[in-house]
Amino acid sequence: MKAFAVLGSLFLLAGCATPVPRSLRAPDIAPVSVAAARAHTAPLGVRVRWGGIISRVINSPHATWVQVVSRPLRHDGRPRRARFSGGRFMARVPGFLDPAVYAVGRKVTVLGTFSGYQKDPIGRYLYDFPVVQTTAVHLWRPRPRYSRYYYASPWPWGWGIDFGPDFDGGGHEEDEGPGYWP
């Protein structure tokens, strides 16, 4: 009986683990941050996995340039919510990406080779973007948004105080709220 309990708890723990998506797995990823690349201390040609929030998508005849505000990555490769950023970077994706799908504000993680720098304006400021030649791009699905407040129960057989999903706001908005949640 004890063996079944141990085996069941192992399966439960294994089910809670979220692995890195298959497209973003690589054995030779260098621990180079966007901040190190912006400081010109990162070597060119290393394989990196960076992610963040899409701030601009530019389609050219042979490639799509995705401008990303970097965020630290979680254990599964998803960008974290954070108040700070290591800076911005440009991801060069061969082919066409639809700007309606890869919309501003969506979370993205890229895998590729750090290949240099490109100067591009942000407003009137000329910004020096680190460039990643991508081999894989993973667009993250928005997570459901849950209410942190009590509300009246929507069930027809009575009223009460309940805590749960926020059904009146659509419930499936991006999880980039105005505050910082670790």
Image (spheres, rainbow, N blue to C red):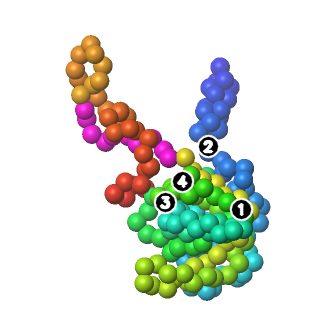
Q: CA distance from mark 4 to mark 1?
A: 15 Å
Give the vertical position of 166 relative to 66 (above or below). above
- Residue displayed at 60% across by 33% down: 12
Q: Nearer the viewer, mark 4 or mark 3?
A: 4
Circle 4 sits in a helix, a strand or a loop, which is it?
loop
The three-letter amino acid code for the residue at tag 3 is Val
Circle 2 sits in a helix, a strand or a loop, which is it?
loop
Q: Residue 95: give its label.
A: 1
The three-letter amino acid code for the residue at tag 1 is Gly
Q: CA distance from mark 3 to mark 1?
A: 19 Å
- Residue displayed at 40% across by 66% down: 83
Give the vertical position of 156 relative to 119 (above or below). above
- Residue displayed at 55% across by 77% down: 35
From the image, tell me which residue sits under label 3.
104
From the image, tell me which residue sits under label 4.
100
Residue contact at pointers 4 and 1, CB within 8 angstroms? no
Q: Residue 17: give its label.
A: 2
> Magenta includes 181?
no
Which is more N-terminal, label 3 or label 2?
2
Give the vertical position of 135 relative to 164 (above or below). below
Circle 1 sits in a helix, a strand or a loop, which is it?
loop
Q: Nearer the viewer, mark 2 or mark 4?
A: 4
Q: Main secondary structure of the magenta part?
A: loop
Q: Nearer the viewer, mark 3 or mark 1?
A: 1
